[in-house]
Amino acid sequence: FKRADMESGQNVIAVFNFSDEAQDGFDINLPGVKALTPLISSDEKTYGGNSEYRKILVADDGGFKLNIPAYSGLLFEAE
């Protein structure tokens, strides 16, 4: 899911995994997006999860590979 704010120009990408299995190496193609800056992950240790998802992701050939924990949601700012 992508949300664009026309006034500020901010684009937020939401990725969800409703499965009981982690999705490692999940490919997501976002044309024109060069980097994803993590805003929040429902699997962060702060929320009782297991990860610390604060690394900025840089596009590789126009796409991103995400590791999405089971039953989780991730929000990124697209740049």
Image: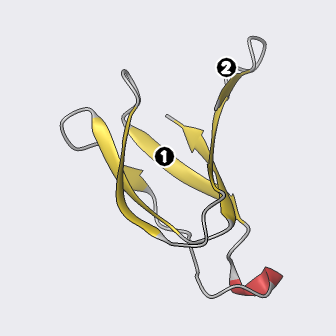
Picture quadrant where residue 66 is located: bottom left
Residue located at (73% from left, 68% from top):
42
Circle 2 — which element?
loop
Q: CA distance from mark 2 to mark 1?
A: 15 Å
Q: Which residue is mark 2?
A: 9
Q: Is residue 50 above or below residue 57?
A: below
Q: Nearer the viewer, residue 59 or 48?
A: 48
Q: Nearer the viewer, residue 37 or 62?
A: 62
Query: Which amino acid lies under the numbered mark 1 shown in the image of this protein?
Result: Leu
Residue density around tag 1, few if under 14, some if 14–19, many if 20 or more, within 10 Å: many
> Horizontal placement of 37 versus 5: left or right?
left
Residue density around tag 2, few if under 14, some if 14–19, many if 20 or more, within 10 Å: few
Residue located at (71% from left, 87% from top):
45
Residue located at (18% from left, 36% from top):
61
Residue at the top extreme, as displayed: 6
Q: Which residue is mark 1?
A: 36
- Which badge, 2 or 1, is on the more N-terminal residue? 2
Give percent across and percent down for residue 4: 69, 20
Give percent across and percent down for residue 59: 30, 42
Assign the N terminus to one quadrant of the image.
Answer: top right
Q: Is residue 21 above or below residue 62?
A: below
Tag nearer the camera, 2 or 1: 1
Give percent across and percent down for residue 25: 32, 61
Q: Is residue 67 above or below residue 34?
A: below
Residue located at (78% from left, 13% from top):
7
Query: Which amino acid lies under the numbered mark 2 shown in the image of this protein?
Result: Gly
